[in-house]
Image (cartoon, rainbow, N blue to C red):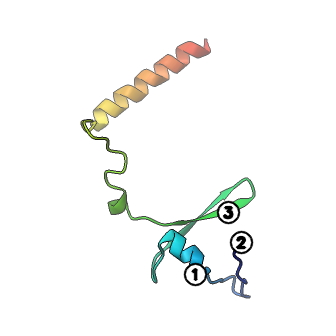
Amino acid sequence: MHESTVTVKGQTTLPRDVRATLGLASGDKVRYLILNGEVRILKARSIKELRGILSRSGQKPVSLEEMNEAIAAGATDSAALVR
């Protein structure tokens, strides 16, 4: 387990092992995710880095119109189940 001290200004230094694990370098940004009383630190990623993250080989891209149609169909199916 790693720890660091919080200064009067609320600042802290991330331990070397934590920075290495997250792949952080000087100037990188981090995000804090609060879940059930715990905080997770994540390396902030730019939109450019996220491009293609959900792509699968052999799967064609889906248009916004196709997405909206699928959402509408799912909402209709869900409404039918509630009745």
The residue labelled by disc 2 is 1
**Mark sitting on residue 46:** none
Left or right of 16, for residue 64:
left
Q: x%, y% of residue 34?
A: 66, 59
The residue depicted at 71 percent of the width and 71 percent of the height is 1
Indicate the amino acid at tag 2: Met
Q: x%, y% of residue 8?
A: 74, 88
Indicate the amino acid at tag 1: Arg
The residue depicted at 35 percent of the width and 33 percent of the height is 67
Indicate the amino acid at tag 3: Val
Marks 1 and 2, the one that precedes in the sequence? 2
Instruction: Give how far apart the Cα atoms at labels 1 and 2 are.
Output: 12 Å
Please tell me which residue lies in front, 48 or 78.
48
Instruction: Give how far apart the Cα atoms at labels 1 and 3 are.
Output: 19 Å
Left or right of 5, for residue 80:
left
Tag 1 near tag 3, CB within 8 Å: no
The residue labelled by disc 3 is 39
Query: Would you identify the image quadrant in which residue 46 lies?
Result: bottom left
Q: Could you tell me which secondary element the residue under label 1 belongs to?
A: helix
